[in-house]
Image: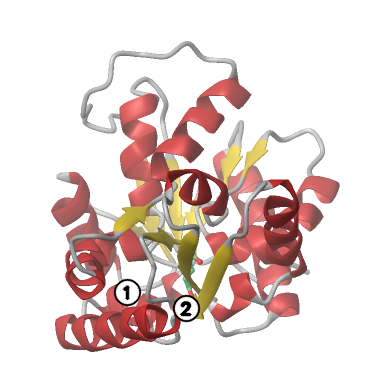
Amino acid sequence: MFDSGVGGLSVLRALRAELPGVRFTYLADSLHAPYGERGADWVAKRSQAIVQWLRQVHRIDALVVACNTATALAIDGLRARHADLPIVGVEPAIKPAAELSASGHVGVLATRGTLGSERYRALRQRLEAAAGRPLHIHDQPCDGLAGAIERDDAEAIERLGLQHVTTVRQATPALDTLVLGCTHYPFATEVLQRAAGPGVRLVDTGEAVARRTRQVLGLEAAAHGQPPLAGSVLLTTGEPEALTAAARRWLGWHGEARRVVVPDAA
Ligand code: DGL
């Protein structure tokens, strides 16, 4: 699995509960984070290079694209080039959010890359066509927020979280559901929930992605627990200390992350 950085750990947290026997290779491309404001071609090329490397060096059997931005901009190309590899992506949970929303007013927090993608536009259009009632979806590009979470910059997380959620609330006063459409954002839940207020439900995708991955791998549901990620490795193109600290804090992981070099594809 890979993400631009530490955000995909929110997906790994759900995966390890759903798939206790599986060994995960997690790659944080932190040297290049954040992806969200980089542009479609760059994200598509970099994702190809990463998957080629994960296959050659780590012999992965399946891939989870633990990044909404990379899913939105690269997953079609990855599936085309790696037709023999089971691939699961992560997309903003607007469908479950619309089902949960009483008012039909839903906010979507995500990167500019995700919200501007053709894939997201089509997902939203399909949902609106099938909804059977008027839906009011407010897309909010959260510039800077994933980067602040990546740097573990508490002041910036607080300021940007408040700023972006306030923009959604002002545009959508009847808001009752807020989608966390970037895998970094669950790590800012406390700030986002406080900014949104107690009447707004936050919706994350980690557990749905974990269930989908289990189905794709053809594995039985296991008793949920918090197994120790035995045999799994955490790799980063950035600072190993940052990934180790994030995994320790959010997953209770006791290992050390390793730095790796993932070349751009030839
Ligand atoms: N965690 C990623 C996502 O889900 C990317 C955030 C970023 O790198 O901008 O979109």
Q: Are marks 1 and 2 in contact (CB under 8 Å)?
A: yes
User: Which label is found at residue 47?
Assistant: none
Image location of residue 192, percent across then percent down? 25, 70
Q: Nearer the viewer, residue 161 or 89?
A: 161
Taking the spot 41% from the left edge, 30% from the top edge, the residue there is 23
Q: Is residue 55 left or right of residue 243?
A: right
Q: Nearer the viewer, residue 20 or 188?
A: 188
Position of residue 143 relative to residue 149, above or below, is below
Q: Is residue 49 visible?
A: no
Q: Is residue 82 left or right of residue 248?
A: right
Residue located beneath label 2 in the image: 34
Residue located beneath label 1 in the image: 150
Packing grade of label 2 (10 A; few <14, some 14-19, many >=20) is: many
* Secondary element at tag 2: loop
Q: Does the beta carbon at disc 1 come under 8 Å from ligand 1?
A: yes
Image location of residue 128, percent across then percent down? 69, 56
Q: Quadrant of residue 182?
A: bottom left
Taking the spot 31% from the left edge, 29% from the top edge, the residue there is 17
In the rendered structure, which disc, 1 or 2, sits on the residue that comes first in sequence?
2
Position of residue 230 relative to residue 170, above or below, is above
User: Disc 1 to disc 2, how far (Cα)?
Assistant: 8 Å
Task: Name the amino acid, label 2.
Answer: Pro
* Secondary element at tag 1: helix
Q: Is residue 244 left or right of residue 8?
A: left
Q: Is residue 73 left or right of residue 247?
A: right
Taking the spot 39% from the left edge, 86% from the top edge, the residue there is 144
Q: Quadrant of residue 48?
A: bottom right
- Figure coloring: secondary structure
Q: Does the beta carbon at disc 2 come under 8 Å from ligand 1?
A: yes
